[in-house]
Image: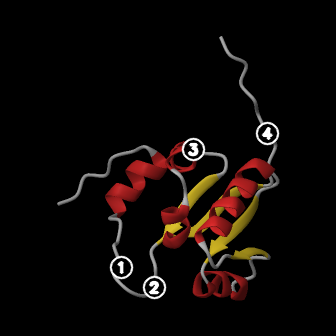
Amino acid sequence: MGEEKHYESKGKIAVIGDRELVLGYRLLGIEDTFLVTDKSEASRKMEDLLLSHNYNLIIASQFVLESLSSVTKSKVESSINPLVIFMPSLTGNMQEESLAALAKRVLGISIKTG
């Protein structure tokens, strides 16, 4: 059996993404915010945040999700520490994830609707 690695994170929240998302969370008092403007920068920053083991929660914009490689995307989607949540873009073609789909992806539970 492989040895599990446990990292002690510090209970911090990080926000990574476009200007609107980052500024919104700064106004709410989140200090660790990272503005990214291109896909390679977004991908590198997400990798750095994941490897730092300093955060319990990473909130990222849809732009960041679209910039990740399939390997990193897979890591992010299966990660529970840190938990990574993607926020839909406030502009353009907004694709909303239903509450049931979000609960299934993030919490691993099914919510009956209707």
- Using a 10 Å C-alpha cutoff, classify the residue at mark 3 as few (fewer than 14 neighbours), some (14 to 19) or many (20 or more): some
Q: For residue 19, which numbered disc appears in the image? A: none
Q: Give whichever of 40, 74 is nearer the camera.
A: 40
Q: Earlier in the sequence, mark 2 or mark 3?
A: 3
* Residue designated by label 4: 7
3D distance between C-alphas at marks 4 and 3? 16 Å
Q: Give whichever of 31, 19 is nearer the camera.
A: 19
* Residue designated by label 3: 75
Are the residues at dot 4 and dot 3 in contact (C-beta closer than 8 Å)?
no
Q: Where is residue 22 in the image (x, y as percent from the top left)?
A: 66, 81
Q: Is mark 3 on a helix, strand or loop?
A: helix
* Residue designated by label 1: 94
Location of residue 94 by image quarter: bottom left
Q: Earlier in the sequence, mark 1 or mark 4?
A: 4
Q: For residue 90, which numbered disc appears in the image? A: 2
Amino acid bearing label 1: Met
Q: What element carries label 2?
A: loop
Amino acid bearing label 3: Lys
Q: What element carries label 1?
A: loop
Q: Give whichever of 62, 15 is nearer the camera.
A: 62
Q: Report whether 23 appears left or right of 32.
A: left
The answer to whether 47 is drawn above or below residue 66 in the figure is above
Q: Report whether 60 appears left or right of 35.
A: left
3D distance between C-alphas at marks 2 and 3? 25 Å
Quarter occupied by the N terminus? top right
Q: Where is residue 114 in the image (x, y as percent from the top left)?
A: 17, 60
The answer to whether 40 is drawn above or below residue 35 in the figure is above
